[in-house]
Structures are given as C-alpha cells and as structure tokens.
Amino acid sequence: MVTRERIRHELEVRRTTVERVDWLNDAMVRITVTGESLRGFTARGPNDHVKVFFPDPDTGTLTAPHRTAEGLTRPTDGLILSRDLTPLTFRENNSAGVPELDIDIVVHGDDAPATSFATHAHPGQPLGIAGPRGSRLVPDGITRAVLIADETALPAFTRWLRMLSPDVKITSIVQVNTEEADQYITQEHRDRSNIELLYREDGPGQLIEAVRSLGSISDDTYVWAAGEANELVEVRRHLRRDLGLSPDQVEVEGYWKRGIVNLDHHAPLDPSDPD
C-alpha cells in the first residue's frame, strides 16, 4: 500500500535579501536569498512550495504580511506581489555563517511578477518568503516512481530525485520548450533517473504519447506530474481512468495554465473529474 505522510509547519513570513543571481540558461534564473530570518526554515517534502513576495518594481518597496500577537496580518497599504514557488535548496549557513535559500524561476516575458522580478533581479533586493505551510513526505511502500515535469516543475523534480530512497527506481519524462532549456538537466539528474526529454517545438501531443508508452503501472509505483494544466488533464485521465491507478498512487498538479495569470494550483486540475 502506498502512503504519503503529511506534516504541518507553523507559518512564518521571513524577510530576506537577494545575495546572488545566476542565469542557469536562457529560461531559468537561480535567486539565492540570505537572512537570519531563514534560520529554522524547513521544507521536508519534494514538492513543497513557499509564497514569495516581490518588491514593487517601481518603488523597490517590499509589501508582505507580518506576524503580530494576533497572528498573521496583511498590510493595508502598498502593492502586494506574490507567487507560489518551490524552494530548491536550503543551507543553514553560507561562508558568512548566514542561512541561504535557492529559488529557481522560469522567465517568459515581463508580465508576471515572478518572471518580471527574476529578469531584472540583482543583489540587495528584498524578498519575503512565507511558508511552507506543510509538507507531504516522499511516499512509503513503493519500489518505483514515475516523475513527469516541465520547466516550471524542474526544481520540484530535482527535489524528488534527491529525496527518494536510492532503492526506488525512477523513470522520468521532462518536457521543455527548446533544447536550451534542457541545460538544467545535469549529470546528477541523469545518474539518478532514466530521463526522456520532450521538446514542445517538435509539436503537440508528445506528452500524453510518452506517458502511454510507459504501459501498465504496478501498484507499488508512485506517479507525480506537474506542469501546464491543460496538457496534464489528459495525462491524469489516462493514469486514473485508463490504467485504473488509485488516488494514493497519483499526484498531478497544474503549476500554470496558458492564458491564466496567478493560477490557483490547489484547484482541481479537471473540474469535471475532481477526484
């Protein structure tokens, strides 16, 4: 039987400062933030997320909730800009003895707050980090995992590879826009998993065909998929309806959706079939 334990964390909003900005390729930026407020930060699940608060691009002022004796308080003034992102790597101490956190952001234009910030990010800027509220740990009772991700889910994909037991065999399908985006995939990724790379520029329909080509999936396998919501609806239907996998074996998350700004990734991926 496949199980995934859930744990809750006390919600904290931490004020941090951008320490480094590293362009990993033309489509991904790694933002490293530091600050004593990060001490005690924890994210124990592979696809945990934090809410990142960005400064006003016009004024540089960061507006974010803060904790009071009554609990978390939202400010009444100022522009609040935030997005849910995966915390990639946390280090309790850097060379200066200060905690630091890496967050990778996909850039695709300047319209969305996260990509706009990442495109123009520089050291010294403030960022607010809230959460994670809780963690879903890696599943117990599995011998195999199937991981399906696009660019936006690559940080979570990386965390899955790091956190799954070495005894678990991993098969992965990664979909990216162009060959330049696959520079994110390192030898560390390839050593841990058999990875099939798909390129959107080669045409539609590749993702569901790659998932179907996996064939039957046994009951000791866990499937995690994350990426563009529309593309994943058919993937989820195949896993749940065609293959008959149980809800305990499958997690499919829409991290973004074409034409939708600030998608609520907690909402059902397929409203016609929410289970």
Image: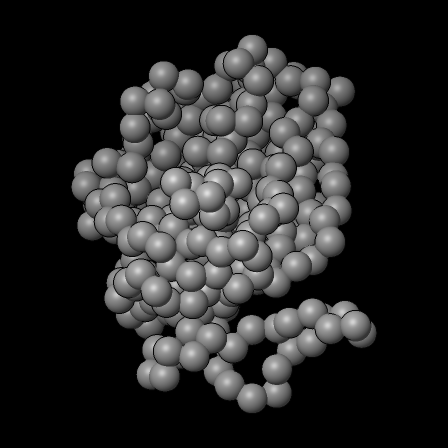
The quadrant where residue 119 appears:
bottom left
Residue 19, placed above or below residue 137: below
Is residue 173 found left or right of 146 in the rendered image?
Answer: left
Residue 83, placed above or below residue 187: below
The quadrant where residue 75 appears:
bottom right
Is residue 109 found left or right of 70 in the rendered image?
Answer: left
Q: Nearer the viewer, residue 208 or 142?
A: 142
Quick one: quadrant of the N terminus?
top right
Report the number of discs.
Answer: 0
Q: Which of 202 and 79 is in front in this view?
A: 79
Residue at screen point 64% across, 72% down: 66
* Image coords of residue 62 (percent x, y): 47, 75
* Image coords of residue 6 (percent x, y): 74, 39
* Image coords of residue 257 (percent x, y): 44, 59
Residue 133, placed above or below residue 196: below
Residue 205 appears anywhere in the view: no
Is residue 255 found left or right of 245 in the rendered image?
Answer: left
Q: Which of 19 and 210 is in front in this view?
A: 19
Q: What residue occupies the far front of the structure in this picture? A: 96
Q: What residue occupies the far bottom of the structure in this picture? A: 77
Is residue 10 found left or right of 129 in the rendered image?
Answer: right
Residue at screen point 32% across, 68% down: 116
